[in-house]
Amino acid sequence: MTSVSATQAAAGANTQPTSSATQNMVDYDMFLQLLVTQMKNQDPTSPADSMDYVAQLANFSNVEQGVQINAKLDQILAMSSLSEAGSLIGRTITGGDGISGVVAQVRLETSGPVAILEGGEEVAMSTGTVIS
């Protein structure tokens, strides 16, 4: 069991992760449960300063907002790439390696769009590709 899974099991979390990205993230409720557990189990002879808890909560909130913003930006970038890829269909392109033809399909890969020509050849859309 991973450390996050063990932490979720120990805290009694009933949420099921939906992707590998969410499996590695502690959600806001889990953070609060851990913070309360930390408060319950602190040394009574030298309790933690309440400002430390507020700072932890603020830091976690900032990180969570940053993650959400990144996820939204990734969605916007993917939609933009799809829109650009769709505009290539039916146009003539010439790749940097000299392969030329009319674009029938476009496949998006992590390295960028790949144009599939009517003849079946594939042209990676990169520096040196001419679209006409």
Image: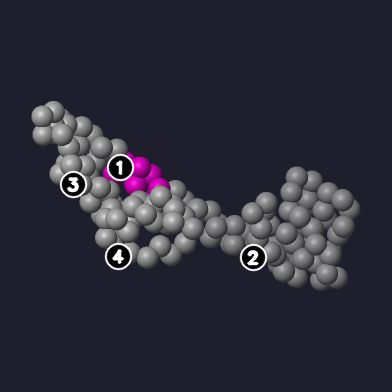
Q: Is residue 93 magenta?
A: no
Which quarter of the figure has residue 89?
bottom right
Inter-mark Cα distance, 3 to 1: 14 Å
Of mark 4 and mark 1, the one earlier in the sequence is 4
Q: Nearer the viewer, mark 2 or mark 3?
A: 3
Is 6 left, or right, of 38 in this rendering?
right
Of mark 3 and mark 1, the one earlier in the sequence is 3
Mark 4, residue position: 14
The residue type indicated by label 2 comes to Gly
Residue 86, which numbered label?
2
Stretch in magenta: 60-68
Q: In the rendered image of this protein, does residue 49 appear above or below residue 131? A: above
Is 43 left, or right, of 122 in this rendering?
left
Mark 1, residue position: 60
Disc 3 on helix, strand or loop? helix
Magenta stretch, overall SS? helix
Disc 2 on helix, strand or loop? helix
Query: Is disc 2 in contact with disc 4, using a CB cutoff of under 8 Å?
Result: no
